[in-house]
Image (cartoon, helix red, strand yellow):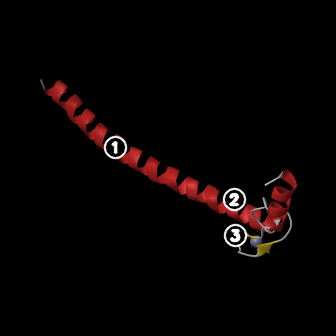
Amino acid sequence: MNKSNLMNHRTNTTRNCEECGTIIKGRSDKRFCDDHCRSAYNYRSARKENQELQRVHKQLKRNRKILKLFWDAGQLDSVKY
Ligand SMILES: [Zn+2]
């Protein structure tokens, strides 16, 4: 396949908007039909990432709380003896 065939193939490919599913005409490397869909998609994926971070943070906080309990128990022991 020569270069111009490859270009034609790319141009003729239709894609669907990753946000709303609308068929995108034109350049095949476009992922969204318009700016609204692009920002909506990016906002959602950023929020998803944030939720993942919050989940990890929650777990870390819990671990820290448990460690603090052990630490405090250790402190009390050393005061006692
Ligand atoms: Zn769209």
**Mark 3 = which residue?**
19
Under mark 3, the amino acid is: Glu
**Mark 2 = which residue?**
42
Secondary element at image label 1: helix
Between 44 and 7, the one lying in front of the other is 7
The mark closer to the camera, 3 or 2, is 3
Q: Residues within 10 Å of mark 3 (few under 14, many from 20)?
A: some
Secondary element at image label 3: loop
Query: Quick one: label 1 or label 2, which is nearer the N terminus?
Result: 2
Distance, label 1 to label 2, CA atoms, is 32 Å
Q: Is 68 located above or below residue 49 in the figure?
A: above
For ligand 1, the image quadrant comes to: bottom right
Query: Where, quadrant-wise, is the C terminus in this rendering?
Result: top left
Q: Residues within 10 Å of mark 1 (few under 14, many from 20)?
A: few
Q: Position of residue 10 (x, y in %)?
A: 80, 61
Under mark 1, the amino acid is: Asn
Determine whether the beta carbon of the residue marked 3 sits less than 8 angstroms from the nearest atom of ligand 1: yes
